[in-house]
Amino acid sequence: MELRHLRFFVAVAEEGSRTNAAERRLHTAQPSLSRQIRDLELEIGVKLLERKARGTALTAAGQVFLDHARLDALMQGKIDVALLRRETQTAGLAFRFLTKEPLIAILPARHRLARHRAVRPQDLARESFISTARGTRPSSEP
């Protein structure tokens, strides 16, 4: 796997669009970018991105891979700090606990779950929701 593959993948994941990633961040042609992503997916044996009507979305495997692609940059000294969910220790990295923050769901007042005092993650399994999991831009999740 080449560093270029990771850089291209991270750019597409964060931009949410192959075209925007190619033009704005990578200064390359979109077909070349798509070929690099396809090569990466073939190399690791899993689909990372899927085309949507408006851009590109991460698959579940793509989200996990994105987290690790960014940790590689940390290991190579290209970034100084990564804010992540708890994971197993990795040689060469020091993990420090920052804060424990509750996960909350914001619902329309008339939503069927709004009257409940607490909502379990499994209660939201079939709901459409917005998540900030892809970079800092909210994205619609099925």
Image (cartoon, grey):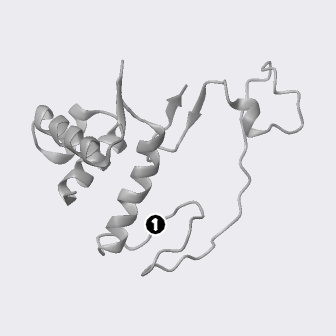
The answer to which of 98 and 49 lies nearer the viewer is: 49
- Amino acid type, residue under disc 1 in the picture: Ala
**Circle 1 sits on which residue?**
82
Determine whether, in the image, residue 120 is placed left or right of residue 134: right
Determine whether, in the image, residue 76 is placed left or right of residue 103: left
SS class of the residue under badge 1?
loop
Q: Tell me the quarter of the picture where residue 114 sits.
A: top right
Q: Residue at x 51, y 29 (%)?
A: 140
Determine whether, in the image, residue 14 is placed left or right of residue 4: right
Q: Residue at x 66, y 24 (%)?
A: 127
Q: Tell me the quarter of the picture where residue 35 sits.
A: top left
Q: How many marks?
A: 1
The answer to which of 96 and 92 lies nearer the viewer is: 92
Q: Is residue 7 above or below residue 62?
A: below
The x, y position of residue 3, in whole percent, is 21, 59
- Could you tell me which quadrant the N terminus lies in? bottom left
**Residue 49 in view:** yes
**Residue 136 in view:** no
User: Which class describes the residues within 10 Å of circle 1: few (<14), some (14-19), or many (20+)?
Assistant: few
Q: Residue at x 71, y 58 (%)?
A: 101
- Could you tell me which quadrant the C terminus lies in? top right
Determine whether, in the image, residue 124 is placed left or right of residue 142: right
Q: Residue at x 19, y 58 (%)?
A: 2
The x, y position of residue 87, in whole percent, is 57, 65
Q: Is residue 70 above or below residue 10?
A: below
Q: Is residue 22 above or below residue 94?
A: above
The x, y position of residue 5, in whole percent, is 21, 51
